[in-house]
Image: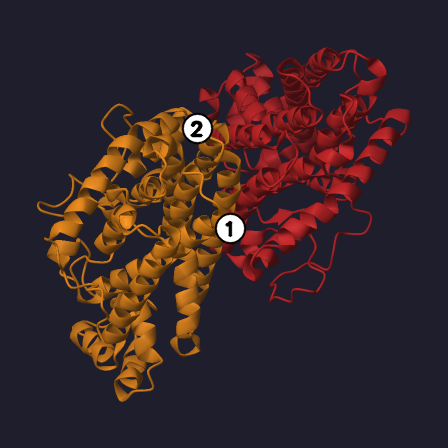
Chain colours: A red, B orange
Amino acid sequence: MQGAVPVGEGGAGGAVPEQAEVLLGAARARVDPELRRAIGSLPAAMRRVARHHFGWSDGQDAVPVPRRPAGPPPGAPPGRAGKAVRPALVLAATEALGGRPETAVRAAAAVELTHNFTLLHDDVMDRDTTRRHRPTAWTVFGDADAILAGDALQALAQRLLADDPHPAGPAAVAQLAHCVVELCEGQQADTALERRAPAEVTLDECLAMAEAKTGALLGCACALGARYAGAGPGAVAAMDAFGREAGLAFQLIDDIIGIWGDPARTGKAAGADLLARKKSLPVVAALTSGTAAGAELAVLYARPPGEGELPALVSAVERAGGRDWAQAQAADRMSRAVQDLSRAVPEPGAAEGLLALAEFVTRRSA
Amino acid sequence: MQGAVPVGEGGAGGAVPEQAEVLLGAARARVDPELRRAIGSLPAAMRRVARHHFGWSDGQDAVPVPRRPAGPPPGAPPGRAGKAVRPALVLAATEALGGRPETAVRAAAAVELTHNFTLLHDDVMDRDTTRRHRPTAWTVFGDADAILAGDALQALAQRLLADDPHPAGPAAVAQLAHCVVELCEGQQADTALERRAPAEVTLDECLAMAEAKTGALLGCACALGARYAGAGPGAVAAMDAFGREAGLAFQLIDDIIGIWGDPARTGKAAGADLLARKKSLPVVAALTSGTAAGAELAVLYARPPGEGELPALVSAVERAGGRDWAQAQAADRMSRAVQDLSRAVPEPGAAEGLLALAEFVTRRSA
């Protein structure tokens, strides 16, 4: 079932990831000052919340922080969000289309602020208590301050683009605002799907939810990068499609890792999604597979979580074809992404950076 | 202590309120189609939440609505937000500066969407259960959907301005985004002030909070109207100042009504803020008055709410000078607003509409 692109094969070495890591590091270095300037412009109370969320609580803003952990566990990987995937996509898209990445730094920061606004709010809604190895903002500062910090980050993102003298600024504001509505739609669909009985959820619904919740912002990042290179509507749309498909591949691999990943390498507790009865993509593929193992999984999912059940859950998803489907689907999405990219950037050499980033985020160890 | 402007004197008749009512009605008629179009563009699940919030639940979007009331009580006044004060200010400011109000309809709708985004989120944070005589969105649809609908309205507001071909659009996006950060700051200060002991709260802090939470958006409404008339920075800033001062007067009168208003006319339970130990402006003025009645109020506020205590609370605030201070402060703010307005619009005739609106919102029966 494995496609041409070695998705999820754990290739941590090799030339391509190295190029991606260079791009990610460069994007972080370029965007961090802009992000810190934007956050620094916030009123003190919201600045504290945002600095905690970004992991910048360096003692400058002393606040009473209950349950603040001593730091990431030894050897834990840095949080993925810390990798600046979205800003790197903006800058790489600008460069791929002949623009100067340094002119798109505000757009890259705006996309990162938007991503973090959604994380702050999602954590409140989902009652998630840990993010990037730290307690989530609402657990430290309360719901109200976490919601308000998210609201402020959304406004800061728009302000960065609106204040940008770059000619692409106004169109970028409109596209980012469109994207935010789609992100909200994705999160709404996610919470609604989680409330429904597993038998009532279709795979198409889950894929549409993942595209809105994850694909849309990766697509928007690439599209804004294209706009900042002065690209025409065709290239902007193709870049958006590239980012969306890569984003879906990314989500599929993320879901695979959530079940079969090595906690020591991924920083995630293995099987936590299964124990929480989450309707991740491999699970819904298994539940809707029409196989005996799928029916077995449905029975297990209908029971309250019990001790020692994890191996049976994992095995049922696997035997029902959930893992194979997700791997194949991720490979298929990456292959579509590559096609979209070749439409946006006909010259293969110019597309290398974007391709490296897309492969990097879908190539993590499963 | 009453200033030159008869603030809070209950002048419901007279020529000025009539002009304001005409402006409010015209603004509602102009902005409603734009608002409905924007809300109509939302994905179905969020559209339902927004339609409920705006009071448009006309059966087109049938949803299970627990505890939906039969309608406003007979003779109850319409919700103030239904009066379109902010959109009317945008359009009146455009007209006052020689622009055509019909060109500023999107800006007026964007301001109204922003106002409603903050209401949706504030209700979640403050656990308020009723707004505009209906159950708040979070009580009907849950926290997650109410938060997401608010996020989407913020994005819609920005999108309306960003998609607007009017030359003022880009600057308006930036100013509205600045304003949203200030609104968040105001709500953050409000929730923080409510958590602190009454003795630790100063009147200056409360006034700053009210300016950020209420004055900022009224100021922004007027400033955007000025921008849409093609006004220069001086007039834009003076319009902002006018709206801010009028907004503070409005908040002061609102707080007075919350204590001394007639529930049959205001639609608010008299004294509910006192029973909830809210630190409204007249209360903090009383608490910080250095009078014996102020000390009495502090003792009462330190007790848990008890039956039959309301007359003693109201009397203590009044004897400590809280009502007189708030009346005088409101009159002072209105007088400053009038001065700001005369800087923005030197020709008195052209400023009439804005003045009528400002007096209308601060002239409700106390």
Report how far apart the C-alphas of labels 1 and 2 lie in the structure.
36 Å
Q: Is residue A234 left or right of residue B189?
A: right
Residue bearing the label numbered 2: A196
Residue bearing the label numbered 1: B181
Residue type highlighted by circle 1: Val
Look at the numbered disc 2 and give the secondary structure of its residue: loop
Chain assignment, label 1: B
**Of residues B333 and A132, which is closer to you in this image?**
B333
Q: Quadrant of the N terminus of chain A?
A: top right
Q: Is residue B143 visible?
A: no
x, y percent for residue B205: 44, 69
Which marked residue is nearer to the observer: mark 1 or mark 2?
A: 1
Q: Is residue A31 left or right of residue A160?
A: right
x, y percent for residue A7: 77, 20
Q: Is residue A351 visible?
A: yes
Q: Is residue B51 above or below residue A48?
A: above
Residue depicted at 27% across the width and 37% down the height: B27
Residue depicted at 71% across the width and 18% down the height: A327
x, y percent for residue B352: 25, 49
Total count of labels: 2
